[in-house]
Amino acid sequence: MNDATHNEERQVAENLVTRVQNGDRTAETEMVERYSRGLRFLLRRKTRDTTLAEDFLQETWAIALVKIRDNGLDNPARLAGYLCGIANNLALGEKRRVNRQRTSVNSEIVALIPDESSNPFRHVSRAEVCKQVRGLLENLTKERDREILERFYVREEDKESICKRLDVDGIHFNRVLYRARQRLKSVIEAADKRSHFRVVS
Amino acid sequence: MDEKYINENMLVERYLKGKLTAEQAAAFEEQFLSSDELLNELEAAERLGQGLHDMSALENAHVTKKPTSNVVSLFQSPRYAMAASFMLLVSLGVSSVLLQKNAHLSEFDSNQAIPTEIIPLVSVRGAAGSELNTLPLGDTPKQFVLMLDPGFETYSHYRATVYQLDSAKEPAMLWQVNEMLPGYEDMLALSVPSSVLNPGDYEIQLEGWQDEWPANHGFEQLDTKTFKIKK
């Protein structure tokens, strides 16, 4: 995120918080749409449970919207940080198995939260990803690059030991990982675009 | 925390592996919450890891790997590769000496072996640049092979242009090599004869080209590196 994007995010956040505090329901929808994908990702990583992550996502919004409507935020530009804090606390609370005081399901909030239909990375099946990754590895010209990916992602070895063992420098290592990620990202996004074509009668 | 910083420090992979400190993770989460681009990177890396795991599991389920013999292990070992590379270099050196000593026997006796210096150019900022990337010209003609990092994105081929810098004038184009492809360690090797260089400051502009681009599409500017030639 460069400075311009960072400033833009701060301005958008401040604007959304002010509008929500002033009772603007459209702003609530915008806010939920803007941050739900990231919150969902964060919660899924922390809980390792898709269903629980969805529950916590609703709860995060229930807590955040009530607070913002009633009192705004001390630092509205840091809205994203505030939302992350709530989500992390919920996930941490679950980990510690502390009795949580669950907020009741608010159907109004549930309706605001976008589903994952627009996210190509959640659409694509596990078998399809496996096929794409196989193709990606077959296209690698160097056996060593394939080994870097396998050692890092499958055997969970750390960068330093892989670089030492395979006698590669850190820059090359980073590049292999980056390129593999970019290639997979492009094929998933391209496949998603193709799937959006529909026969219109 | 811009894109370059994130890639150079592998924040995406480190976050997914839980290897960031609590402060780093909190700052990173705050950033990706409002960035679809960063979320795409995270999800792609997550799917890549999952795909590799699944593939490995499938392969292990179907293939029983033959135990590797000691001899095969020896030939596959990095130590053997290093030893073999060393022997190759020694034999090349000996061959080169023999070739020069017996030049009168060769039909290529007009060709003189030109000393070559291989120099990896590093990105430098500010005053540090005056110390690093400084190449001595010397008295005898030689060939500089400047190793350039093409960056993270992959292009069909690359173009490097050397400019002579002079504060009083516009940079003057001096040397250009097109159709470059990454070689050793994915680096680009730009060969420049010392005869075209004089003491002073130089700049290399590195550009990339994708074959699928239309003909009227320009090269994409990738990186600029500076170096200095001294006597």
Image: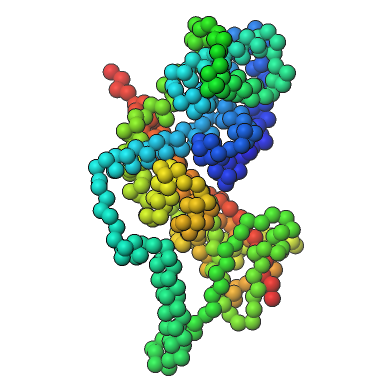
Q: Which residue is at 49% across, 84% downward?
A: B112
Residue B128: percent from left, percent from top? 71, 59
Q: Nearer the viewer, residue A11 or A102?
A: A102
Residue B113 shows in this picture: yes
Q: Is residue A108 above or below residue B139?
A: above
- Residue B193 position (above or below residue A173): below
> Is A127 on the left-hand or right-hand side of A113?
left
Q: Position of residue B228 (x, y in %)?
A: 67, 66
- According to the image, what is the colour scheme of the structure? rainbow
Q: Where is residue A182, by image quadrant?
A: top left
Tell me where residue B111 appears, x and y as whole percent: 46, 84
Q: Residue at x 53, y 22 (%)?
A: A95
Q: Nearer the viewer, residue A97 or B27?
A: A97
Q: Is residue B208 left or right of residue B78?
A: right
**Viewport quadrant of the C terminus of chain B:** bottom right
From what the image shows, is residue B105 above or below residue A83? below
Q: Residue at x 68, y 30 (%)?
A: A7
Count of labels in the image: 0
Q: Is residue A128 above or below residue A57?
A: below
Tell me, yes or no, if residue B217 can be seen here: no
Q: Quadrant of the N terminus of chain B?
A: top right
**Residue A129 rendering spot, x and y as whole percentages:** 35, 35
Q: Is residue B227 left or right of residue A41?
A: right
User: Which residue is at 65% across, 64% downward?
Assistant: B133
Res A154 → quadrant: top left
